[in-house]
Amino acid sequence: MQTSNQISSNTGTLLLHVNSNIRIVIFFVCTVLCLTPFVSPAIALLMGLVIAQFTGHPYLHLNHKATHILLQVSVVGLGFGMNVHSALQAGKEGILFTVASITGTLVFGYLMGKWFRIEKKTSFLISSGTAICGGSAIAAISPVIKAEKKQISVALGCVFILNSIALFIFPLIGHYLNLSQTQFGLWCAIAIHDTSSVVGAASKYGPHALEVATTVKLARALWIIPVAFLSSFIFKNNSKHISIPYFIGIFILAMIANTYIPAISTISPYVVKTAKAGLTLTLFLIGAGLSRAVLSSVGFKPLLQGVLLWIGISATALYAVIHLA
């Protein structure tokens, strides 16, 4: 729960000062719009960013938990629109890229952190978030390395800023380079941090791109577990508290049900439609959480590390999917 001082700090940086009732009305109108087919994931994120800078998020203290739950439920819903055989094929295509990109990102992230003299835990969280699955990886690894709140906030802010940019520019680059849906789905899953932005970008590109991107990204998210164990060794922490992404197992069960149970396949289009609306709302909430205070807390060197890592993994993955996939 936020204190009154934290709330006044959040509202004090807003560009438009309105009373709390009007702030709540604006927020709920935007929330309802995000559940309609008229608002795309990119527009939802942009709406959230505008809300964060002008009128503010009236329930900011609940935002992280809400986005976490909504994202997981929505991803499971997407599983009801996917086929096991296609997903296995996509997973096979993405496994080598996944292993190479995670290893390379963590190594180069460590070297950059040393070079820029960034605090070790902050640098590791940024590298982990870039390598695996953004905010989910940061949330899972931070208790393992006993990261402080400031270190977690800097890493999350960095990742969410770059996620926001990726959601807008990746589809443009994909169309410009005439990437196939398979190529674009692989690229998104490797180079965009958070699952929500991966799904948002891929769904805009096409249904097969969405299937490939979601499958590869969720397989990638399982790497949280070995990286978390590695983290406990690096930071000499004997903690057994590792957040395992169990929802991925439910996502797999949803795919199996959609593939082999005819009754499920008849209702799956409606479930998928609802799930996509949930992901659009998730992106709105993420944008609404990026207040000026969050953006300004990141700092130049951590942001530079995040940008360089992201550009490196994006360029390398793009080359790989064009020439090697």
Image (tube, rainbow, N blue to C red):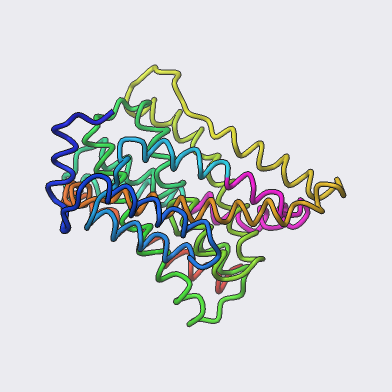
* Magenta residues, start to end: 74-101
- Position in image of residue 247 (x %, y %): 59, 36
Compare residues 30 and 300 and report the one nearer the observer: 30
For the point 42% across and 66% down, the residue is 43
Report whether 86 appears left or right of 154: right
For the point 76% across and 50% down, the residue is 84
For the point 72% across and 57% down, the residue is 269
Report whether 248 appears left or right of 316: right
For the point 13% across and 41% down, the residue is 9
- Position in image of residue 319 (x %, y %): 49, 71
Magenta stretch, main secondary structure, is: helix
User: Could you tell me how many numbered marks the image carries?
Assistant: 0
Compare residues 169 and 41 and report the one nearer the observer: 41
- Quadrant for the C terminus, please: bottom right
Q: In this view, does 198 lie above or below 181?
A: above
Report whether 11 appears left or right of 66: left
- Quadrant for the N terminus, please: top left
- Position in image of residue 47 (x %, y %): 35, 61
Based on the picture, tell me whether residue 9 belongs to the magenta stretch. Answer: no
Q: Is residue 111 visible?
A: no
Q: Is residue 254 above or below residue 160?
A: above
- Position in image of residue 62 (x %, y %): 36, 36
- Which of the 4 image quadrants contains residue 170? bottom left
Q: Can residue 237 be seen in this view?
A: yes
Compare residues 35 and 263 and report the one nearer the observer: 35
